[in-house]
Image (cartoon, rainbow, N blue to C red):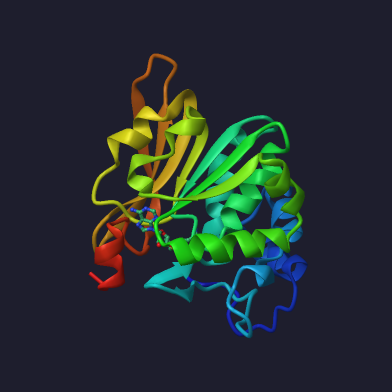
Amino acid sequence: MAWLLSGRGIHDSKAMVEGLKSYGVISSSKVAEVMWSIDRALFVPEGSSAYDDSPMSIGYNATISAPHMHATCLQLLEKNLQPDMHALDVGSGTGYLTACFALMVGPKGRAVGVEHIPELVSSSIENIQKSAVAPLLKEGSLSVHVGDGRLGWPEFAPYDAIHVGAAAPEIPQSLIDQLKPGGRMVIPVGNIYQDLKVVDKNMDGSVSIHTETAVRYVPLTSREAQLRGL
Ligand SMILES: C[S@@+](CC[C@H](N)C(=O)[O-])C[C@H]1O[C@@H](n2cnc3c(N)ncnc32)[C@H](O)[C@@H]1O
């Protein structure tokens, strides 16, 4: 999908959301409300154009994804981000999407971020502390952990929703295992050419997979390979 709002002088999250609605990216009122409430400016490097519809470098060969990708993934997962549900954000980076998940599942749910760059985990916690979901972090229904996200985060499994924010060569079995029957995972799959795959776990434990759209993400890889830029 093309980046939609660049250079159009968007100065707040409400205008960003209105832009995404006008282009037909956001159709869900819940997702609109969540993306207004979690201010992207708190999650991007200082001085950058927070509301432009483009990915931005956050250091360590990582990026914050573009708003239209965040909106797309939130909409694909909306039914699995209801109050009290469990959500896992693999490759949580800035913490933006983990914060959105936490707002949706609420204080009796669980929103878990896993990121393998410790410095990004620390800065994402600082970002979240400035945001509308700071109380959920304090109370413990929202947490961010240093780890290899290809292994998921078994402590709070099974998950109703899993989002993977980096492209895997193939879908990690651990993530399928940690998905609840009735759960849904959204994951970019591929190397140079990638597809955003939607994985639904059926009630009998089998999975149904479909391709949503072509995408371009940084790789889901080892910390060493990422830092070497491989
Ligand atoms: C495109 S960024 C997306 C970040 C996040 N969704 C956001 O918008 O801020 C992908 C993230 O995945 C992380 N990552 C890559 N491989 C990983 C792995 N094996 N385990 C955990 N995190 C990983 C990267 O460090 C990076 O922060």
Q: Position of residue 43 (x, y in %)?
A: 62, 68
The image quadrant that residue 70 belongs to is bottom right
Furthest residue toward top = 204
Above or below: residue 154 compared with residue 9: above
Q: Quadrant of the C terminus?
A: bottom left
Nearest the camera: 175 or 128? 128
Count how many numbered circles sit on residues in the image. Answer: 0
Nearest the camera: 30 or 126? 126
The picture quadrant for ligand 1 comes to bottom left
Q: Position of residue 167 (x, y in %)?
A: 33, 55
Q: Which residue occupies 58% across, 80% down?
A: 6
Above or below: residue 52 compared with residue 47: above
Q: Which residue occupies 27% across, 73% down?
A: 229
Q: Which residue occupies 65% across, 51% down?
A: 100
In the picture, measured across the screen, residue 38 lies left or right of residue 223, that is right
Q: Position of residue 180 (x, y in %)?
A: 47, 25
Q: Which residue occupies 63% across, 81% down?
A: 46
Residue 40 seen in the figure:
yes
Nearest the camera: 34 or 212? 34
The image quadrant that residue 132 belongs to is bottom right
In the picture, measured across the screen, residue 59 lies left or right of residue 81, that is left
Residue 71 seen in the figure:
no
Q: Position of residue 127 (x, y in %)?
A: 64, 64
